[in-house]
Structures are given as structure tokens and as C-alpha cells.
Image (spheres, helix red, strand yellow):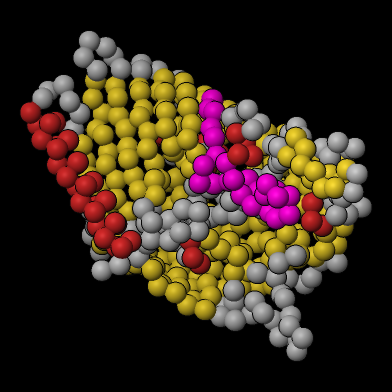
Amino acid sequence: MPYFMKKILFVIAVAIQTWSIFAQTATDSTTSPKVKLYGFIRADAYYNSRQMEESADGFTLIMPKPEKNDVYGNDLNGSDMTGLTATATRFGIDLQPFRLKGTNTILSGKIEGDFQGYSGSLTMLRIRHAYVNMAFKNSELLVGQYWHPLFFGAVPTVLDLNGGLPYQPFARHPQVKYTYKMKNFSLFAAAAYQTQFLSAGVSPDGKSIMKGMQFQKHSLLPDMIAGVEFYKKEKGLRLGIMGEYKEISPRTTAHLEINNETETVAVNEKLPSYAVAAYGSYTKNKFSIKAKGVYGQNLGDLMMIGGYAATKENAKGERTYKAFNVISAWLNADYHLGKNWLLTAFGGYSKNLGCDNKTLNATSAYGVLYDGQMLDHVWRSSAMLSYQLSAWWALSLEYSYNKAYYGQLDPEKGKAMNVDNGIDGSRILAVVQYSF
């Protein structure tokens, strides 16, 4: 048996044994929380009509890759492909709510993992969620790793593991989030840090583009998010608006030519950016409709399009940066056909508005270039049909049509120019899932 398989089985065994100990403790003590083991086994099979920008070894679709022709005029990205995986299989432990003795504070928590990997390594166990939540009379305090707040409010119903990205913010960050609840309103404020979902930047040698946690850590500021939501549960209505502000430090060192020698010097660089999002959902009987719109900058850590470019460089080697502005929106409708069938439709659109500033050159733009080409805009339409055989067993099929428009980076305007007629790509996805 391969080493990594032994390691995975060992981790599962430890998790099950830990759950058993927790369960026994909960039974023996009235002051200890009860725990619940949950998860699912999921197998994904897909067909792509061409190569795609993707993650998780192709099982998270982002958009079609640009056309890239060889010396004979053949598109190097034009080949179709298929795949089959079970790495989306997931398990977790819910710490059931319990009241702290002598207080009105209710504690709950969650530990959840899957086998989607991290940093390009597949079949590796990773943490999805790991948090504790403290509920008070009219408020809650969450500490740990959970969905980024911009993910919430309205979430599309899609089968693909992409969850609606790059149109929907999609990331899990360690965070501290405080929520205050009123009759029909809730307010929240959060501070988060990037870990598995990262901004793009420059490698220490200054020659290559990479992603890393240090870009936010050196800025000394967490990602700060706040929002307000209005809801009428009896009417099935939910509306909300959120805002985000973050800073990253693209470089802490630079390379300068001094007296015909290449020297490494310390630099202090900061890139501020912001985003706003508005969403809404309405549910009545068997029908529901959801939508979200986002306008923001440097959204790569949320798996959306957009990055930034260097616009100036002083004599000390320090650069000034400008973030690319992006607008994105999606609409999703669900309809339950009888007791067992669910039909959904999804549409998304995202546009790179550029940075409206002169860039140094194409190699100084990060997070917006794909195979050397700059994305101008992209859209997707998809439909899913799912059959829920029972509360545990489901068979689902989804078709998505995607089209991406690429061009060249205009260094004078910081936008895409000579945009092509669009590269289209289709995906057919089938999923079998057993939940427990």
C-alpha cells in the first residue's frame, strides 16, 4: 500500500477513535458537549470540451483556457479531457450546542476536513472548517477557520466543486467574527487572514509569480469585513450588503543594480484594496431565487478574477501598485419537482475593468494573466438535475457552458486590448453521493 494511503487511513482511524472518546465522555458527564460525526462519500466524473483554468486537479472548473497555437496553428489548449475522482469525500465532527454551567453562553463548534489537498498536493487531508462559536443572548462570536464572510448571504446551488466561482466569492479564512442579531436585522464585523486561499505576488527572487501567506502577514492588517442583513423568515426574504478592506505587501525585498552589482535591498510596499457585495434571496413553496453582485479589487484570494499591477518604481526599488477593478454578478433559481427531484439554473458574469493606470510592463501584472494573455470578461450558464433517492443517497447531473474573452495587457491604460471573440468550453459533470 502506498505511503500516502497508509497516512490517510491512519488519520481517519484517529478521527473515529477521537470521536468515540468524545461520545463516551458526553454520555458520562452532564457538563460535557455531545458530538456528532457526519460527512459524505462523493465520486465526480466529468468531460471537458477543452482544457480549463481549474484547481483541485481539474475538478473545480473556473473558465476555459485561452487559445495558444503551435507552429502548425493547432491550439495547445484545445484538447478535450475526462476525469474521475473521490477526493471531495468529506467528514466532520460537530460539537453540539451546550450551555456553559452558571452562564447564558452556549458553545458549539466544528472540525471538518476533506481530501482535496493543499498547495498543489492531492489526496492530502486538509482542514476545511475548525472553529468554536459562542452564542449570547443577542449575539455570537466565532473564532477559527470558516467561510469568508463575503461567501455568505446568498450561495448558488451548483453541482461543480467551484461553488459558483469566479462569480461567487469562495474562500475559507481563519477569522474572528462578531454578529449582533435583532428582530429582522443582523450586523456583523470580522477580521480574517489568508491561508489556503491566497493573493498572488512576487517570489523572493523577484523573477516569478507565486501565491503566499506572507503577502498579507507583512501588511500587519487583517482582512476586515462588515455587513448588515435584513430578513423576513415567514416571507422567505433575505437582503444584505457587505464591505471589505484589505492590504497586502507584494514585496519586502527588491533587486537593484548598484555599481554594476546586483544587490538585494529592503523595501516597504503596500497595496490597499476594497470590495462591496449586495445579495438577495426569495423562497416560496418549491421555488427559490438567489442573486449576488460584487464590485472590488484584488479578489484573487476569493477565487475571483482580478489582481494588481506595479505602476511606478522609485530610486530605492520600491514600487507603487494599482489594483484591477472587477465587477461580478450571478443569478440562481431552484425548483423542487415533487419529493425527490431538484432542478436548478445558474448564470454568472464577471468583467475585468482594468486599473486605469499605466503599468510598468506585462511582467509586473499579477493575478490577471493566463498563458500570457489578459482576461477581459467571462460568463457561464449551467443547469443541474438531481435525484434524491433518500436522505442519504443522491445522483446528480450538471451541464455548464463557459466563455472567456482574452486580450493583451495595454500598459498605457492598464486594461485588456485586442480582445478575441471568446473561447468557449463545456463541461458535463455526474456525481454519486452517499451522506451520513
The magenta segment? 189-213
Give the left or right position of residue 94, taking residue 271 as reference. left
Residue 217 figure quarter: top right
Residue 53 figure quarter: bottom right
Image spot of residue 207 (x, y percent): 73, 54
Asked if the magenta segment contains residue 1, the reply would be no
Q: Residue at x 64, y 33 (%)?
A: 218
Give the left or right position of residue 23, taking residue 312 as reference. left
Q: Nearer the viewer, residue 14 or 327?
A: 14
Q: Nearer the viewer, residue 271 or 62?
A: 271
Image spot of residue 406 (x, y percent): 75, 65
Residue 135 in sight from this viewpoint: yes
| Secondary structure, magenta segment, majority class | loop
Residue 276 in sight from this viewpoint: no
Asked if the magenta segment contains residue 209, the reply would be yes
Image spot of residue 86 (x, y percent): 35, 65
